[in-house]
Amino acid sequence: MKEQILSYISQDNPWRDRLQWFDTITSTNDVLKQMAQQGAPHGTVLVADRQTGGRGRRGRTFLSPAGVGIYMSVLLRPNCRPEKLMHLTCAVAEAMCNAVENAAGFRPGIKWTNDLVYSRRKLSGILTELGFDSSGNVAYAIIGIGINCCQQHQDFAHEIRDIAGSLAMVSGHEISRPRVAAAMVDAIENMSRNLLSGQAELLNQYRADCITIGQEISVVRGDSVKRGKALDVDEQGALIVRYHSGETEAVNSGEVSIRGMYGYV
Ligand code: BTN
């Protein structure tokens, strides 16, 4: 599998020889975090066929069965203050749209901040984790991505069957997982070169792909649920929301649900 992935990665991608393949791993994010703490270089990429302890956001489990998805983590060492990386999750989602477009022939939308979706179904999840040095600079960023490639409707567990989709379901043709993995590595490497300089352009493209803008949404924080309309995404990647109360807020945290998606009515 590793050789197949390498055969699709651009010859001039400097990360080619920093890619490691695992048939089974606990979690690519967890293993890469250990490697980062032991000095692994910028551009180290772990890819797995299966995870036994895949993690999602908010402490959730990320089911990661063999043979159908790509589970990947990428190590970045951006060497900057954390305030400079507020838009990182948006940048990763954009890179992933580019990768899917290249490898599967269609461009997904983005549910703020970084779920890739198509026809109201989630195709991919992203978990970004930062580590800091003693002066508070970013020592590493780990970008973890799980993407559904080859599943058909009945392959998903019951609890996610109505909200999950795959590249094969959307495109209607067979998907080459090595090609998807290679497109991801190329797109993230490209994104990482423009991360600190091309923020305005990147966020314009992000707004064009973000399906949350213009939708009726709810923002959930603990027991509080506030309803309103998503108006825009600001220069830091925050979602600008006007609540039904009339108050406007730039939302950075909390769970945002879109009316009509993932079971929210
Ligand atoms: C989410 O949708 O909540 C984010 C899911 C992120 C899953 C990926 S799979 C590769 C990497 N390793 C993990 O344990 N999680 C991320």
Image (spheres, rainbow, N blue to C red):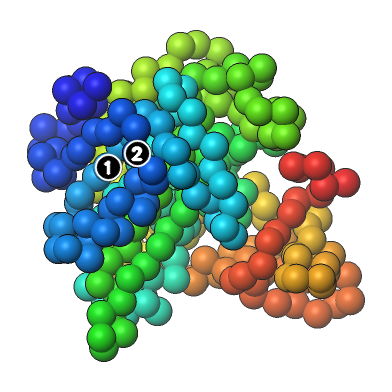
Any part of residue 81 in sight: yes
Please identify the quarter of the rendering in which residue 243 is found: bottom right
Indicate the secondary structure of the residue bearing disc 1: strand
Disc 1/disc 2 C-alpha distance (Å) = 10 Å
Indicate the secondary structure of the residue bearing disc 2: loop
* Left/right of residue 221 with respect to residue 23 in the rendered view: right
| Mark 1 Cα-neighbour bin, 10 Å: few <14, some 14–19, many ≥20 | many
Up-down relation of residue 8 to residue 231 (above or below): above
Up-down relation of residue 71 to residue 233 (above or below): above
**Circle 1 residue:** 46
Q: Upstream in the sequence, badge 1 or badge 2?
A: 2
Q: Amino acid at mark 1?
A: Leu
**Circle 2 residue:** 25
Please identify the quarter of the rendering in which residue 57 is found: bottom right
Front disc: 1 or 2: 2
For the point 34% across and 39% down, which residue is it? 25
For the point 82% across and 47% down, which residue is it? 264
For the point 35% across and 46% down, which residue is it? 28
* Left/right of residue 146 with respect to residue 193 in the rendered view: right
At which x and y percent is residue 183?
Answer: 31, 33
Quick check: is the Cβ at mark 1 less than 8 Å away from ligand 1?
A: no
Any part of residue 13 in sight: no
Up-down relation of residue 114 to residue 20 (above or below): below
